Amino acid sequence: MRGATTCSSSWRSATAVYRRDGQSWHAPGGKPFTSDLSGQDFWTLLRSGYRPVGLVMGNCVYHVAHQSLGGWFSTVGRNCEMPNFTQALYDARELAMERMQAEAQESGAAGVVGTEIHEKTHGGWDAHIIEFFAVGTAVQAISADHQIHAPALVLTVNE
């Protein structure tokens, strides 16, 4: 990486990244930033005029309201949408994403990249608990020109 150097940390089994020009890449509060970006994603982010600020996440565990008996009878034997589950999933997703966005805004980030989203239900066949989890890397601009470089075709020759 031109302009950045990596080194192994002596007190932890992690990799530290620092700028050769002496500018700080610390997160708010003076602590090192955290990220789940790959080396290639990190380099692409830098070339685009941004840097990681920290790992941000949002989570929501949501109880799905039971359907009324009349509503249940109207769907027996039919392949149809269950609006209470659909609305619960929408609400859980929105709450988790809002919480992740709030963490990013608290750190002074301009956006979030590399987001992973996980949804699952807890319980058996009659599960009424939905969990929605989102995690990503908050980023901040480091230069005035935010240019996303055109993708390049890469052919591997080591197979």
Image (cartoon, helix red, strand yellow):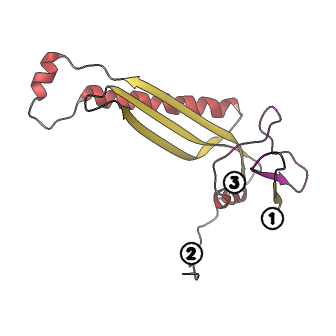
Amino acid marked by disc 2: Leu
x and y percentages locating residue 99 in the rendered image:
56, 28
Amino acid marked by disc 1: Arg
Q: Which residue is mark 1?
A: 2
Q: Which residue is mark 3?
A: 146
Question: In the image, 35: left or right of 129?
Answer: right
User: Mark 3 packing: few (<14 Cα in 10 Å), some, or many (20+)?
Assistant: some
Question: In the image, 140: left or right of 87?
Answer: right
Mark 1–mark 3 distance (CA, rounded to whole Å): 18 Å
**Residue at 68% from the left image edge and 38% from the top image edge:** 109
Q: Is residue 82 magenta?
A: no
**Residue at 77% from the left image edge and 49% from the top image edge:** 142
Q: Which mark is residue 59?
A: none
**Residue at 70% from the left image edge and 43% from the top image edge:** 34
Q: Secondary structure at mark 3?
A: loop
User: Which numbered mark, 2 or 3, is in the foreground of this view?
Assistant: 2
Indicate the quadrant containing the N terminus: top left, top right, bottom left or bottom right.
Answer: bottom right
Q: Is residue 70 above or below residue 75?
A: above
Indicate the quadrant containing the C terminus: top left, top right, bottom left or bottom right.
Answer: bottom right
Amino acid marked by disc 3: His
Q: Quadrant of residue 4?
A: bottom right
Q: Which mark is residue 153?
A: 2
Q: Is residue 126 above or below residue 147?
A: above
Whichever of labels 2 and 3 marks the residue nearer the N terminus, that label is 3
Q: Are marks 2 and 3 in contact (CB under 8 Å)?
A: no
Which stretch appears magenta?
A: 12-35
x and y percentages locating residue 82 in the rendered image:
23, 30
